[in-house]
Every structure is written in structure tokens, then in C-alpha cells.
Image (spheres, helix red, strand yellow):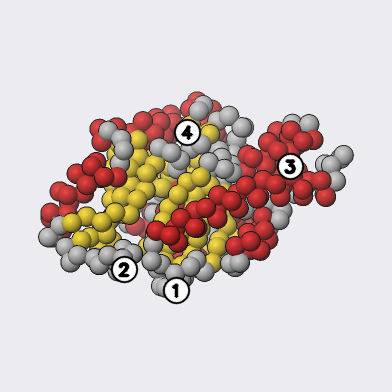
Amino acid sequence: MLGWRKLKGLVGLDIGSSAIKAVELSRYRNGYELVNLALEELGPDGVADGIIKDPAAIALAIGKLFKENSIKTRNVAVAVAGHSVIVKKIAVTANNEAELVDAIPNEAQQQHIQLDMNDVRLSYQVLGRPSESVVGRPNPSNTFEVLLVAVKREKITNYAEVLQQAGVVPVVMDIDAFALENAFEVSYEPLPDLVVALLNIGASIMNINIIRGGEPLFTRDVSVGGNQYTDALEKEFGLSFQDAEMLKSGQQLGGVSPEARAIHLRSVSEIMLLEIQKTFDFFRHTTSVENIQQVYLAGGSARVEGLADLLKQDLSIPVEIMNPFRKIRIDSSKFDLSYVGELEPRMSVATGLALRAFDLA
């Protein structure tokens, strides 16, 4: 997690390819309460593959979202994803934690980050001594497990300038996959030995985070997402972007039968399934961890018709749509509960970001 300053109170702001989502929470007894919830849909060209392509339009959309939803808090937590973000778990040799701090940048540059270190912002979390040996090799006693995160500085600058232009203050920059994990752990309180795959299927990127007991085991961003469904429907039926989006979301459109729609949605779902299977297979072959036991889907395409059933059938693993508000109090006099229910999986990253406010308190 990359942070600029420690301030209390912030809005989780998820700048996605299809929409900007905002969540603000407060403490409520031993848990949390929803304070603000907002979504601003975007056109197809503002953000792509985790890169803000039209800064002026995105800044304007953020400002509009805050104004129209009367969000007063100006501090925000944002997240990044895509090819400009590198996340790796590495083993670093050191006799103590002081040596470890000095060793991590050198280890990162020499072995793991194939970029000029002047071009990236580096962050890390020491996970402790390895709990399991690398397959076929024992762990030496002076080895530490470290979760390494590197983000291209130009990407951080890209986001920071847009946020400044929108009149909000970036307090935290996180990673989409970690924000999703944060929301999941609060909402589901998973058992410590449960191995779970969290799939955040956005418009242009799918984040895959495999975790166990609050520890990320494997993280990967894949350049597939909901836009592929939209593109397939546009081309096959000669639709506009807006009509294809409506059809993807389950709405009926004259001239397109439910059966025809289902065929083309499934063809894209099978592409996603292939990427997920490849990721799971790589994970299994490079770790000594037991098999994945549960899959949770989040993001704007989590509820695409037939996707969850296809994954459940082909992966032979229970698949569930993630609800980030499962353990969060929602005042029915302030929020339309049916609308909140429709948005649940789309708001997962924003909710995880909003929870960072309580890490800084």
C-alpha cells in the first residue's frame, strides 16, 4: 500500500474503465455503517487497461460524482491495476529485520523487478518466516517472506494529477486486488486455512487474488473483462455501445432473442474461464499449497448471465457473487436497499478502499 499522508476519514474511490465508484464508511458499534455510496458511469474511452486516457473527462466525472451525491469528505483512497503494477511474493535472506530493510530494494532490482528502479515506486510488507518450504527445498532459517509491490511512477503521477484536478486529496494508493481482499475479509471473516480465489472482473482488467488466512498467495492481472462481452454483442448484432451494455446486463432488446444473447455471452465467458484455469494451474504448480476451495466473483461483470455457473461447472469449485456490504450496516431510510443490492459486486474495491480509513485512524 502506497500512502501520501496520514489523515482521518476518506472516501474509497474506484476509478474503473466503465464507472467511477465511491464508498464512505463510519464506525458503528463493533463494525461499520455506510455513509455514502455513489456511482458515475463512464464512456468507453476515458480509462483503459488501468490507464486514465482522458484526464480532463475523468476529473470532471469525479467532481460531478462528489457534488451530485453531496460527498463532503475530500480525502480519497484509490487503487491501481494493470501492467504498470507488479506484485510478487519473494524470499529475502537477512539475519534480522534491519538487514532485511536494506536487502529488499537490492533483491527487487536484481531478481524481480525488470524495470529501472528510478521509474517505479516500491512498497513492501514483511510477511515473516516462510510457513512452508519451496517445493523440494527446505527454508533456511535466515529467510523472510516479503510481499513486494512496484508501481510505475508515471502511473502514480497520472492518477495524482487527475485527483488534484478533481479537487480531492489522495491519501492512500492501493492495489485493486488488495482492496478486494480487504473487503472480503471484513464481510466474510474466512477461516484461517481456507484458500480462496477472489476474481474482480472489471471492464478491461480481471484481478485474480488467491489468498489464505489474510495472506495473499498469488496475484495476477489479466487483460480481459466485461468490454469483451460488449464488443462481441456490438459486432454480432450491429448494436451501439449503449445497447450492447444493456443487453449484457440482462435487459431485453428487440430483435435479439435471449438464446442468441446467451450463446455470445458464453463464448466470452469461455475465454475468461481459460485465463482463470491457466492462472489456477500455474498457482498449483508453483506452490505447495492445497487446492483452491472457494471462488468469489466481484466487479461489474460478476453477474453476467451464465458466468458463475460455467465457472462452477468447469472448475468444480463453489462459486459465489461477492457482497462487500454483508457485515456493513445500511440505513434503509437513507439508501434504497434494492439499488444497493444491484451494485454490490461492483462496489467491492471501493468498499475495501473505504476500509483503509480505519487503518489510518
- Of the pair 353 and 49, the residue shown nearer to us: 49
Q: Secondary structure at mark 1?
A: loop
Which of the 4 image quarters holds residue 339? bottom right
Residue under pointer 2: 132
Residue 213 in the image, given as x and y percentages of width and height: 40, 68
In primary-sequence order, the first of circles 1 and 3 is 1
Q: Amino acid at mark 3?
A: Met
Distance, label 2 to label 1, CA atoms, is 18 Å
Residue drawn at x 71%, y 53% is: 305
Residue under pointer 1: 191
- Of the pair 253 and 197, the residue shown nearer to us: 197
In the displayed structure, does residue 33 sit left or right of residue 106? right
Q: Is residue 119 above or below residue 79?
A: above
Q: Secondary structure at mark 2?
A: loop
Residue under pointer 3: 246
Residue drawn at x 55%, y 55% is: 277
Q: Is residue 82 above or below residue 138?
A: above
Nearest to viewer (mark 4 / mark 2):
2
Q: Callout 4: few (<14), some (14-19), or many (20+) C-alpha neighbours within 10 Å?
A: many
Q: Secondary structure at mark 3?
A: helix
Residue under pointer 4: 51
